[in-house]
Amino acid sequence: MNKLLLNMVMLLSGLWRSMGADTAQLRAILYARLTMDDRKPVGIGRQQKKGGKNRTLLASVMNAALGCVYMLPLVVVSDRTFSLAIYFFILLGILTLLLITDFSNVLFDSRDKYILFPRPVGDRTLVLARMLHVFIYLFRIVLPMSLPGWVVLGITDGWKSALLFPLPLLLLVFMVLFFVNCIYLLVLNIVKPEKFKDVISYFQIVVSVAYFASAYLLPRVFDSEHVHEFNILKYPWVQYLPPYWLASCWSWIGFAVPVAGAAFYSIFAVAFPLLCMYALVRWLAPSFSRRIAGIDSVEVAEYRPGSGVRKQSSGRFYQKLGYAFNNTDDARAGFMIAWLQTSRSRSFRMRVYPSFAFIPLYFFVFLTPNKTSLSYAWRHLSDHPGHLALLYMSSFVIISALTYLTMSDQYKAAWVYYASPLQTPGKIMIGAFKAIWVKFFLPFYCIISIFTLYVWGSGVVIDVLLVLVNVTLFVSCIGRISHRHLPFSIMEQMKEKGGRFLKSLLLMLIPAILGGAHYLAVEVWWLKLIFLGLSSILLWLVWDSYANVSWENMIKGEPD
């Protein structure tokens, strides 16, 4: 497959040569990159390569499923030009965000600095190799994602529309490459190169939220009557957007375009992407290469007299919290380690922070069932105990944080736990649990509680307290049963030995029992008080058991 794509790309050798690239070097670099991609392990850490083809197929199926959502404008909107403009706009945004996040390691491969920079390889050849490498990656994503829309156009508009579709799609990919590189250069001009990866991690959070939101919200948006009644003539500014230019290409096969000048816009749709690629390789390449060379550089802090010693008498904020929530030195150490490492770990932030945005989206979907309008649902929100669902949804934040609290790319640094005179590792684990509870769950739960009290009134105060105890109890049970690991001590995707499925089933019974009992007692305040007392006692017992986990009861951090 890679050889076929490489040969297809090199068919345009004359174009690449006119852009200033050495075609022999370009082919050699692309061949090496694609070969290295095939040799990369599918998993993380020590996971085997087996199942790589299946995972690639699964990714293609998922992209095709998302493509079924994105092609809704082609089915719902009657105006073909407007529907195509929306479709290309969605693809342009999703592919741009996806390329910024997933392929930053390709665009900014630090190995070039050590392998290719010392050799006589020009900037334009190097940047063009990166662009074409990413283009091949994009092809593997764009093809399954655009396949549903391609099929719909062929069925509804005939073979001419299906035959024309690949050309605007290819031009769209060219524009995505140009926009992504402009964003990269803009970010590198604003932030220091060593901070670039932190910015990319926040882009990854945006992408994950955008994927989830588009899958759930786009069908509801295109089910609205306002979309069916939209008239593009009322919004003449749409004709100045690149997606509309691509949609104007359908005027070549006889489709009527409401806005005048369709022939001009269709020509511009071809000229603009080609001009973008030429400008990217011709002028942006030197600046691009110079700036990416500093991404892996180490920031050296300037020494200032008196800055080497800091007074620690008052203590920092997290240290004060560590002393306030823990009564032993081991627990305080676990609290501070988890607090600091969760702030410094880029992979932890990337995995946990999206859960803060998912919960409002979940609640939005729960709020408007059966195509109910949002305004109607908001007016009648307080008529039913929907606050329980919202409050219990907050558990996703701390569950996600607890899951990734034990994982790290640098898991071998956990030898310090075993080298220290630590008698009870459970003290470290309970301290780390309290750190993520205080840092992530408690502030977020307070915000949700304020919203709940505003909508449902002060009568749900007991519910707020009971859910707080129940969620903490539930997650504590998960930590005590399935996460008996020291903080950041295991490699990602480590497989536990046996009993995992049974444990998962047993753990699912805990929230079902707690939530069901709470729902049955929602109208009886004194029963909720009894429930609150019993849950608090059980929570204290679980925490005490969690804090006293011995070395014999630990799950080993690294598989044998």
Image (spheres, rainbow, N blue to C red):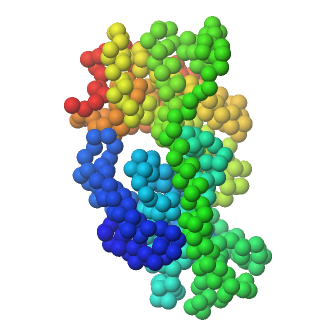
Q: Is residue 523 visible?
A: no
Q: How many marks?
A: 0
Dividing the picture into quadrants, the one containing residue 547 is top left
Residue 65 location, x and y as percent? 44, 64
- Residue at image location 52% in from the left, 25% down from the top: 340
The residue located at (57%, 43%) in the rendering is: 193
Q: Nearer the viewer, residue 560 or 297?
A: 297
Residue 273 at x, y percent in the picture: 59, 73
- Left or right, 452 with respect to 133, comes to right
Residue at screen point 47% across, 39% down: 347
Q: Position of residue 391 (x, y in %)?
A: 58, 36
Could you tell me which quadrant the N terminus lies in? Answer: bottom left
Q: Residue at the bottom extreme?
A: 254
| Residue ID at (21%, 31%) | 560
In the rendered image of this protein, does residue 405 appear above or below residue 77?
above
Measured along the vertical axis of the image, is residue 154 above or below residue 475? below
Residue 163 in sight here: yes
515 or 249: nearer the eye?
Answer: 249
Looking at the image, residue 374 lies above or below residue 508: below
